[in-house]
Amino acid sequence: MTESWVNSAERVGADLHLELDGPGGRRAALIRALRDAVRSGRLAPGTRLPPYRSLAADLGLARNTVSDAYAELVAEGWLTARQGSGTRVAARAEPLRPPARIPKTPGAPPHARAPRHDLRQGTPDASSFPRSAWATSYRRALQKAPNQVFGPGDPAGRTELREALTEYLARARGVRTEPGRIVVCSGFAHALRLLFGGRVLRGPLAVEAYGLGFHRGLLAEAGVRTVPLPLDEHGARVERLGRERAVLLTPAHQFPTGGPLHPMRRAAVIDWARARDGVIIEDDYDGEFRYDRKPVGALQGLDPERVIHIGSVSKSLSPALRLGWMVLPQRYVAGVLDAKGEREAWASALDQLSLADFIVSGAYDRHVRRMRQRYRVRRDRLVAALADQAPHIEVAGIAAGLHAVLRLPPGTEPSAVEAATGQGVALDGLAAFRHPETDMAVRDGLVVGYATPAEHAYAAALEALCATLPPRRP
Ligand SMILES: Cc1ncc(COP(=O)(O)O)c(C=O)c1O
């Protein structure tokens, strides 16, 4: 049953084509068609609908059918009916916005069928989530929580967590701050949304030439142009910073290529920020995981007024918790709080209190120490397998984090990714992280996440990986 109705411009402001089909009879079909027209914006708020009689005649329907459909949509809030002004599209019937086109993050898509060997970067070892220690902290937090915790939350975050983070970040990452300059958020992605979507900062934003496309997509959605900074063996070439007033860096462990920012570049970027009244956004996504030496302290420690330091538990505990923090220069605190709104709408107060307890009780340090040991062994096994089975393939970058980059001969990356995928080994090539506008020479490499496979499956995953690598060139 498909019928159409095209009505005149002065009646509804625009030509309208209604498709009356689908299950449930003509009344249901008309309700659906009108609701879709409002939802999609084809019928704009305030638009006057034709009288029952005319619409019924146009569509060949009984008048009752049309009046019932209007009444139903009035009851649902899509239409309003007022004596004397007829039936109109409700003012608050917001059309559905087209979904934002944010590129998918390389890494594990949530619902894809599991590959035989999952070596995609992105997630920590899920089997090591400290379930019982977290439950202990959660229970303790719940028992101690004042009643006010169960009301609307403070957008800055719970004081207990901000105090715990102040002490922890100073000790573990060399961050210099105080609780009043920390704003709790749901992770790095949320922090970017608050900073740029909330207009605390404006573009253009300089970013590293290799990074997460997902983050670039979030920025593009907020109307921010990203300008790629080339990378070399010392990290981002900060001397190439142009007219931008903000730069996003991963100083402890460049994501994904794997080197730290050279001490001279660290000093140079701070000098740049001071000279240009600029700001550095420090993405400290895996700063605790360094295996060959003590982690290099956060860049923020060099100048707390020039660096926005952002961290989260996504690598150290789990991205499922959606808990992170922004350590802000004083001048941005009010703007970020404004962007968050009147009350906490992202981070559960109980999870915040649990994390505070987890940190203060020492459970966080114990967990990070245990995971550091586990990931170090995983990385060593990867390096050993390569030395044994593919000695011509080098591991780039420092011994850190949850992933490694295998350097490949020029031009071999696409076939190497294809060969691995064909053998059931899921991983990404460096090309998946490359800024589309960079003029930097292409680097061929495979990004291998070593945290995800279960312990019993890791040896087989390494074997399968080595078997698919390009052979030594003659
Ligand atoms: C480069 C990079 N930055 C930040 C994050 C953390 O993101 P979020 O805190 O939004 O989970 C990740 C992933 O864990 C990452 O790979």
Image (tube, rainbow, N blue to C red):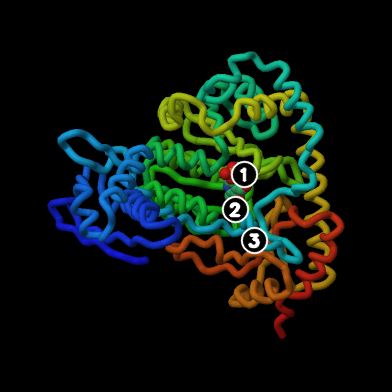
In this view of the protein, can residue 263 be seen by the observer?
Answer: no
What residue is shown at x 48% (from left), y 60% (from top)? 435
Q: Nearer the viewer, residue 138 or 160?
A: 138
Image quarter for residue 75?
top left
Task: Inspect the image, locate mark 3, and give the three-letter code of the amino acid beneath it.
Answer: Ala
On the image, the x and y values in percent for residue 181 come to 52, 25
Disc 2: which residue:
255
- Label 2: element kind: loop
In front: label 1 or label 3: 3
Q: Earlier in the sequence, mark 1 or mark 3?
A: 3
- In 3D space, how far apart are the residues under numbered discs 2 and 3 (Cα atoms)? 24 Å
Can you say whether 147 is above or below 256 in the image? above
* Eye-nearest disc, 2 or 3: 3
For the residue pair 158 and 248, the one nearer the viewer reads as 158
Q: CA distance from mark 2 to mark 1?
A: 9 Å
Q: Residue at x 72, y 61 (%)?
A: 118
**For the residue marked with disc 1, what is the amino acid?**
Tyr
Q: Given contact means CB atoms under 8 Å apart, are the residues at marks 1 and 3 in contact?
A: no
Is residue 99 visible in the rendered image? The answer is yes
Residue 267 left/right relative to 10: right
The numbered dot on residue 112 is: 3
Q: Tell me the residue at 65%/42% (across/down).
A: 320
